[in-house]
């Protein structure tokens, strides 16, 4: 099972405050534990929404909106992608995160097996295989 651990933004992250060396060191140790356990597939911090762009869709119309965006609690500051055996294992890894405040959100990926067989799913599987994801 793949999960995305979503790090929610804070006022500090949205203000562009960089993490301290201590925080970077703790995060690196946590990342190393996940890499050594074979569960971490990817992870990164994201720059503040002052550098972000949103594309809004309204039928065929597309609008481009530059950040920053309001409602910090709804914004993402970073993520990890992990592959684990169960929901419970994903929760245990998230609980080991070195954060002292805020919260993480765990979201399971849709896997190809979650969909009913169809021509569209076979095409999606072929593309995933071509991308090296299967």
Image (tube, grey):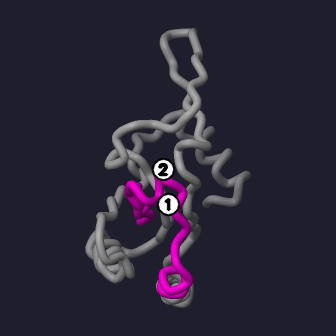
Residue 117 higher or lower than 22, as above or below:
above
Q: Is residue 59 above or below residue 69?
A: above
Q: Which residues are magenta?
A: 1-26
Image point 29% across, 78% down: which residue?
Answer: 95
- Which residue is label 2 attached to? 112
Q: Which residue is nearer to you in this view: 124 or 22?
A: 22
Quadrant of the drawing holding the N terminus: bottom left
Q: Label 1: how many residues lie within 10 Å, few (<14), some (14-19) or many (20+)?
A: some
2 vs 116, nearest the viewer: 2
Mark toward the viewer: 2 or 1: 1
Magenta span contains residue 48: no
Relative horizontal placement of residue 47, taking residue 59 as reference (left or right): right
Q: Residue at x 50, y 65 (%)?
A: 81
Question: Of residues 33 and 45, which is closer to you in this image?
Answer: 45
Residues marked 2 and 1 touching at CB (< 8 Å): no
Quarter assignment of residue 71: top left
- Secondary structure of residue under mark 1: strand
Mark 1 sits on what residue? 78
Residue extending farthest to the top is 60
Q: Say how many tags the image has.
A: 2
Residue occupying the point 69% across, 59% down: 132
Query: Does residue 58 appear in the picture of this structure?
Result: yes
* Sequence order check, earlier mark of 2 and 1: 1
Q: x%, y% of residue 82?
A: 47, 70
**Residue 6 can be seen, yes or no:** no
Residue reaching furthest to the right: 130
Observer-nearest of 46 and 96: 46
Disc number placed over residue 70 in the picture, else none: none
């Amino acid at each position: 099972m793949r999960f995305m651990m979503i790090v929610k933004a804070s006022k500090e992250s949205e203000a562009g405050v960089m993490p301290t060396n201590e925080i970077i060191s703790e995060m690196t140790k946590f990342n190393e534990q996940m890499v050594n356990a074979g569960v971490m597939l990817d992870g990164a911090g994201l720059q503040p929404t002052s550098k972000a762009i949103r594309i809004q869709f309204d039928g065929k119309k597309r609008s481009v909106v530059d950040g920053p965006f309001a409602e910090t609690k709804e914004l993402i500051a970073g993520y990890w992608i992990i592959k684990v055996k169960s929901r419970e294992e994903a929760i245990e890894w998230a609980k080991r995160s070195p954060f002292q405040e805020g919260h993480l959100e765990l979201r399971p990926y849709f896997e190809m097996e979650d969909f009913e067989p169809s021509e569209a799913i076979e095409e999606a599987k072929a593309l995933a295989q071509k991308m090296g994801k299967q």
